[in-house]
Image (cartoon, helix red, strand yellow):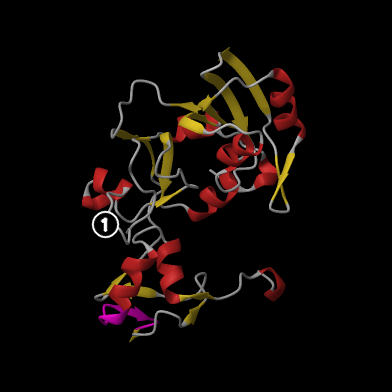
Amino acid sequence: MSPKDSKPPLSLCRALSKLGIVSRTQAQELIKRGHIAVDGVVCSDPERPVNLETAVISQNGQELARASRVVIMLYKPRSIITSRKDEQNRPTVYSLLPPELHHLHCVGRLDWATSGLLLLTNDSMLSAWLTEPAHAVPRVYTVTVRGRMTEQEADKMRGGIVDNDETLRAASVLVRKASGRETHLVLTLQQGKNREIRRLCKALGHEVTRLKRVSFGGLTLGNLQPGEFRQLTAEELCAAFPGAPL
């Protein structure tokens, strides 16, 4: 490999995370406690730059190798935070997982009030590919909003709405049922911007009262119940995400 083709150095804690063995937070703790060595020398600085392609990284004398890819699909319930810790001590998605899966990171986020399909993995390259807007991986949601949403308003969401200098857009919108009290929608996103559906609906004067992600790429929740999860096979991932780095 020529010098121009080699990858730039990473911080030691990020390099450990990239190996898919521990989370970055867990890596920082291991390093600070003196459990990690680089090329045979114990390092206590989580920010030390290392070249993951050439450095020999070990934990308590045992050389670390890249872990096998793990991807799980979780049915996230409402009132659960998509993060490792919460300042308000609200339950997080990690409270639903056994300790041996706590090193996985979430692929994107679902907010506190949103339920549905959430992916977690130890493969940072895969998660970056899945969340890159240029790859336009579709996410489908069922949405309930207050008031009657018209087809003209649905057209506006498809065409794009500017909010805080950011263009929000739904790839598709299906009005399933509408009344003066509420409207039920099936909405597809391909950008995945922060709180995009809630912001789109609010811009049109509709408050979202229920939001659930029902599919991600070619994956659906199937028989999973809220709070349940299962590991995905390589075959499922290849079929669900053609072109992904699998």
Q: Locate residue 37, reporting x and y percent.
A: 34, 80
Q: Is residue 163 visible?
A: yes
Q: Is residue 211 visible?
A: no
Q: Is residue 164 left or right of residue 15?
A: right
Tell me the quadrant of the picture where the N terminus can be found. bottom right
Label 1's element?
loop
Q: Locate residue 167, reporting x and y percent.
A: 73, 45
Q: In the displayed structure, would residue 194 be above or below residue 152?
A: below
Q: In the displayed structure, would residue 238 be above or below residue 57?
A: above
Quarter of the figure with residue 43? bottom left
Q: Residue at x 27, y 82 (%)?
A: 34
Q: Residue at x 39, y 84 (%)?
A: 45
81 and 237: which is toward the camera? 81
231 and 227: which is toward the camera? 227
Residue type of the residue flagged with mark 1: Asn
Please report the bounds of the magenta region as a residue range: 32-40
Q: Is residue 161 left or right of residue 8?
A: right
206 and 95: which is toward the camera? 206
Residue that lies at the very extreme toward the right in this rendered image: 159
| Residue 39 belongs to the span the image colors magenta | yes
Q: In the displayed structure, would residue 150 be above or below residue 109?
A: above
Quarter of the figure with residue 4? bottom right
Residue that lies at the very extreme toward the front in this rendered image: 180
The residue that label 1 is drawn on is 89
Q: Locate residue 233, reporting x and y percent.
A: 40, 34
Q: In the displayed structure, would residue 129 be above or below residue 189?
A: below
Q: Residue at x 61, y 29 (%)?
A: 188
| Residue 47 belongs to the span the image colors magenta | no
Total marks shown come to 1
Q: Locate residue 101, reporting x and y percent.
A: 29, 50
Label 1 Cα neighbours within 10 Å, binned few <14 / some 14-19 / many ≥20: few
Q: Residue at x 33, y 44 (%)?
A: 80
